[in-house]
Amino acid sequence: MFEIGEYIIYGNTGVCRVEEVAARPVPGTKTERLYYTLEPVYDKGCRLFTPVDNQKVKMRPVLTAKEADELIKRIREIDILWVKDEKNREQIYKDAIRTCDCEDLIKIIKTLYLRKKARLKAGKKVTSSDAKYLHLAEESLYGELSVVMGIPKNEMEAFIYDKVKED
């Protein structure tokens, strides 16, 4: 169970701060259930209520600063997503995003960056699907790393690029 004040990843919402853990009535019954009250870090004024035992939405603690640093050091080693069947490309991206796993997000970013580069070089536009999933992966990854490392989210891409370039 997460503690009040802890930062967690809550599905595609991204980084949230646990504001409260409290029993709330279950609608339509006389029973109560433990709920988290979550405040998304990048959506000020928004509050989410989710059961502590929610199995539908992925919840996990954010990385530690040490884990984040190690992850950034391993970016070059992390492979891209190999998509054999173009028809399944979007589903593969969706599935990878749903894992809320930083390594999977890096795979998407690397894959789509290379794909974007190749398409532009060939005189083609970036597909809207590719642009959408690149944006989602970047927002999720940079959002988490920003909170963990204390670097503004809008500076995270450049920070990572500089770190990877150093190695």
Image: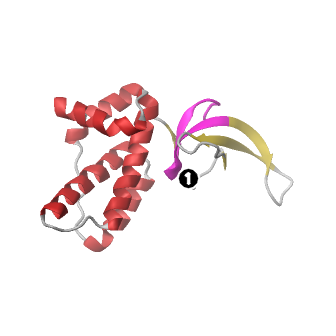
In this image, 107 relative to 91: left or right? left
Q: Is residue 148 magenta?
A: no
Q: Position of residue 54 (x, y in %)?
A: 62, 50
Name the quadrant of the N terminus: top right
Q: Position of residue 28 (x, y in %)?
A: 83, 61
Q: Position of residue 85 (x, y in %)?
A: 25, 71
Q: Position of residue 88 (x, y in %)?
A: 32, 70
Up/down of 10 relative to 116, above or below: above
User: Which residue is depicted at the point 24% across and 53% down?
Assistant: 113
User: Which residue is depicted at the point 37% across and 58% down?
Assistant: 133
Examine the image and state in which quarter residue 126 appears: bottom left
Question: Most extreme residue toward the right, as rendered?
Answer: 30
Q: Is residue 15 magenta?
A: yes
Q: Nearer the viewer, residue 32 or 71?
A: 71
Name the quadrant of the C terminus: top left
In this image, 99 relative to 43: left or right? left
Up/down of 141 relative to 87, above or below: above
Is residue 1 in view?
Answer: no
Query: Badge 1 is on which residue?
Result: 57
In this image, 131 relative to 122: left or right? right
Q: Which residues are magenta?
A: 1-19
Q: Nearer the viewer, residue 12 or 52?
A: 12
